[in-house]
Amino acid sequence: MDIQKRVERKLMLHVASIVFLLYFFFAIDRVNIGFAALQMNDALGLSAEVFGWGSGLFTLAYLLFQAPNAELLRRLGASRGFAIIACAWGLVSTSTAFVPDQFWFLVNRFALGMAEAGFHAFMIYYISRIFPKRVRGYAVGVSFVAVPCSMIVASPLSGALLDVDWASLHGWQSLFILEGGPSVLMGLLCLKLIPDTPADAKFLNDEERAWLIGELSQVADQSEHTGALRNIREAAFNPMVWALGFVLFTMVLAINVMTIWMPLMIRQVSGAGNLAVGALNSLPWITFSIGCLIAGRSSDKVKDRATPLRISVAIATFGFFCSAALQESSTAFAFAAFLLACLGAGGAQGVFWALAMQLLEGRAAAAAFAMITVVGSGSGVFAHPLIGSLHDSTGSFGGLVWTLAAFYIAALATLHWISRARTPNNPDDASNGLQPDAAK
């Protein structure tokens, strides 16, 4: 085996695996509130609207502190940065078990958003500094798989933990303590297991370490040679950025529904127990993962990003529409249609960023991607209070599924506009910060 393959294999084993576990527990501590709500809402007297505001405040803090936290983590270095942020969100998540009322519930959710902010951005930054360019995409992909994996594992686990009462604590309190603790442990392990730089990678021998340092030194960071404000301005006034941001807004809205509201939806329509709710909640994530893998692979095979994305969004639109229409007549068929929608939503997630990277090139691309992310993630600020209000006013989640169907119809129309608006690169526009590229 040549030195390149040896180094890449060791990086995947010693670094990507740790990042995967961090992202795994990161996702669990973010979404276990959805399961805890099955008991916690009654215990604390939380209405669906207040619960929604808690999720909205989490997202607001997550967006506000994203950039400053990421910069702080960069200055601290990987081992200390990952350790501090993992311990922080683990402790805040664990403390949710002891919130006494609505006010402290809202404070706790805002604090958790602060604690988790910056992790995703810093993870991408760290991968770009420790992995050779040819395997960075795969390394990021391995990390992202942690999210659906965490949902598949955490769904039945969380349902089972709700039935665990110990030391005068209720099931929902046990859930936060037992699922928040591993994040703190992972944070402490990062101090020993995560190398700050290639030179600190003790799992490599001297020859491998020298090769990796030389390989990474060939990659120039062009972002340091451009004006940040100019890049942000060019991204802000590019209509393609806002169009892609709206598509991501819709996709993140569906993910928010799956992570936060799905257990409550399943309980309401099925009346199932905690363990059954957990098992049923894993099914949408399984189909989501399948869709992500199928769309991503087909996109690579046919070398076309736009068509698989449009097909995936169309499938999601059809699934949400059928699920909403069938809720009153057949719960089983409505759930099956929702699974079809999750298959399409997962496919869209698997192709979206590949399309965005092809449509937007040039020195302002990084700023454009950041702005798309902020616009997309902003759905959580507005969506959760709206969902809670819809439930309180109607007594069901039917309006939520209709809302998802409407957003996906709008996203499909937006993708049609993007396909018509994109044009091949013009040599005369080579100086532009953002250059539209063909989607193939």
Image (cartoon, helix red, strand yellow):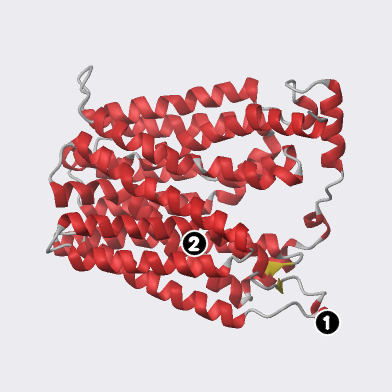
Depth check, front residue: 102 or 382: 382
Callout count: 2
Image location (x, y in percent) of residue 372: 56, 63
Above or below, comparing residue 412 to residue 379 in the picture? below
Q: Dot 1 lies on which element?
A: helix
**Residue drawn at point x = 32 percent, y = 64 percent:** 319
Which numbered disc flags the more N-terminal residue, 1 or 2? 2
Q: Which mark is residue 376?
A: 2
What kind of residue is marked 2?
Answer: Gly
Quadrant of residue 73 within the rendered picture: top right
Q: CA distance from mark 1 to mark 2?
A: 32 Å
Q: Alpha-carbon neighbours of circle 2 within 10 Å: few (<14), some, or many (≥20)? A: many
Query: Which residue is found at the position 44% from the left and 72% from the top?
Result: 411
**In this rendering, would 367 be left or right of 330?**
right
The one nearer the camera, 31 or 50, is 31
Q: Which residue is mark 1?
A: 428
Is residue 365 visible in the rendered structure shown here? yes
